Amino acid sequence: MSETRQDLAKIEGTYVFDGAQSSKGYRLNKFFFSLNRAENRAAYKEDPEALMERFGLTDWEKRKLREKDWLALAREGGANIYFMYKMGSVTGDSLQHIGAAFRGETLEEFLSTRKVKGAR
Amino acid sequence: MGRIVAGIGSSHVPAAGAAFDQGKQDAPEWKPLFDGYRPAMDWLREAHVDVAIFIYNDHGSEFFFDKYPTFAMGVAKSYPPADEGWGPRPLDPVPGDPGFSWHVAESLVRESEFDMTVCQELSVDHGLLMPLPLLWSHQPEWDIKVVPVAVNVVQHPLPTARRLWKLGQALRKAVESYPEDVRVAVLGTGGLSHQLHGERFGFRNEEWDRRFMERIVSRPEELVELSHHDYMVQGGAEAVEMIMWLGMRGAMSPEVKLVHQNYYAPMLTGMGLLLLEDTASS
C-alpha cells in the first residue's frame, strides 16, 4: 500500500517539508535561494531590511529572521533547512549554530554531544 | 556496447568539500574520512571508468520550488560548480558526455517510461562534487566524465524507494544498449543517517547505517520495501536521501562483489562509502 501524507506527520521534532510547508515557505525559501548570488549576499550585508523587503517577506518572517528564531521559521514558516542554512553566509551562523537553536541548546552544549567537534 | 563496471554509494557532506579545499585531508578530524576514499580511487583508476552516472540531489543550489523536477538529468558538455551561498568551489567544470547522455535520455524516456527533465545547463553542488574528487583525479584536469541524474528528495511527495530501484534498472538497460564501448560507474549519493532540522536535529543511528550498508550488498530488496517514513524514523528526516543508493544498486548485477567500504560519523552525518564490482561484466 502506498504511503499517505498522514503517515509522514508522526515523527517528533520533525517538520516534513511537504506541499503545505513549501507553499507557506515559498517567499522565505526564495529569499534564502537568492543568497546563492554574490550580489544578493552583498546587498544583505549592506541593508538586510531592504533585501527582505525586496522578496516581499511578511512582518512575521522579517521579525523571526531578525530574532534568528530558526525553529519557528522551519516549523511555522515553512523554511527548508537546505535553503535556510545559506543565511550563515551572511550572518556567520553555522549549521551547528542553527541546529543548537533548534534543540534549545547553546552551541557548546550541542557540540558536547558530538564525537569529533572539529569535523565541521 | 556500454558496460557497468562499478557501483558506488557515498555520502555527500558539504563540510567535507570545504575541508578538501582547505587541504585538511590529514587533519585528525578528517583523516578517517579522506583515507577511506583512497583505496576506492586506486581501484577505480585500474578499472578505467569512462563515465560516471551520478544519482544525487541538489540542495537549493540549481533548482528552486518554482519548478521542481522529480527526476532531471544533464546532457551538457560540462557542469560548473554551483555557488551554494559561499561562492563556487575552486574546481574546474566537470566534463559531460552529450552523446552518451542523450542516449540515456532516449532510453529512459522511450524504453523505460522514465520521463526525465533534460537539462543543457546545470550547475552541480555538493551532492555530486563532494565525492567526485575523492574518487577521480581532478588535476591537471578531470579524469572522468559525468552524467548528473538529480532526484527530488527534498520536497514531498518524493519518488519511492522502489521507484529509485527501477530507475537503476532502467539505467542499466540504457548503458547496455549504447553501441559504443564505454565503461560506466553508477553512483548513488546521500545519507547516511542524519537529521538537520527541528528539535530532532543531530539524530544519528550508526547501527542502522551499518546494517543498511550490509543489506544493500546482499539483500537490497529489503530496503526497496521500506517507506519514506521508515527511512526518516530510523535514519533521521534527511536520511531519506539514502533511497538514492538504491538507484545505484538497481543498476548493478544481482550478485556483486564488495570491493571496499568505509564509515565515519564524527559530527552530524553517518558518512558511508561503498564500492561494488559488477560481477556480470567481470
Image (cartoon, grey):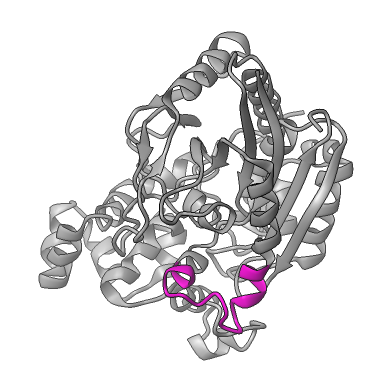
Out of A42 and A109, give the one closest to the viewer: A42
Question: Is residue B140 found left or right of A108 in the rendered image?
Answer: left
Label total for image = 0
Q: Is residue A97 above or below residue B107?
A: below
Q: Residue at x 78, y 41 (%)?
A: B277
Q: Residue at x 16, y 68 (%)?
A: A48
Q: Residue at x 54, y 84 (%)?
A: A118
Whether residue B229 appears in this view of the structure is yes
Residue interval drawn in magenta:
B18-35
Q: Examine the structure image and report whether residue B233 is included in the region drawn in magenta.
A: no
Quarter of the image with the C terminus of chain B in it: top right
Q: Is residue B279 above or below residue A108?
A: above
| x and y, in percent, of residue A14 in the image | 59, 59
Whether residue A3 appears in this view of the structure is no
Q: Is residue A41 above or below residue A97?
A: above
Quarter of the image with the N terminus of chain B in it: top right
Question: Is residue B162 found left or right of A59 in the rendered image?
Answer: right
Quadrant housing residue B3: top right
| x and y, in percent, of residue B233 in the image | 72, 56
Out of B51 and A67, give the one closest to the viewer: B51
Q: Is residue B99 above or below residue B138?
A: above
| x and y, in percent, of residue B253 in the image | 81, 30
Q: Examine the structure image and report whether residue B31 is included in the region drawn in magenta.
A: yes
| x and y, in percent, of residue B257 in the image | 85, 43
Out of B196 and B118, give the one closest to the viewer: B118
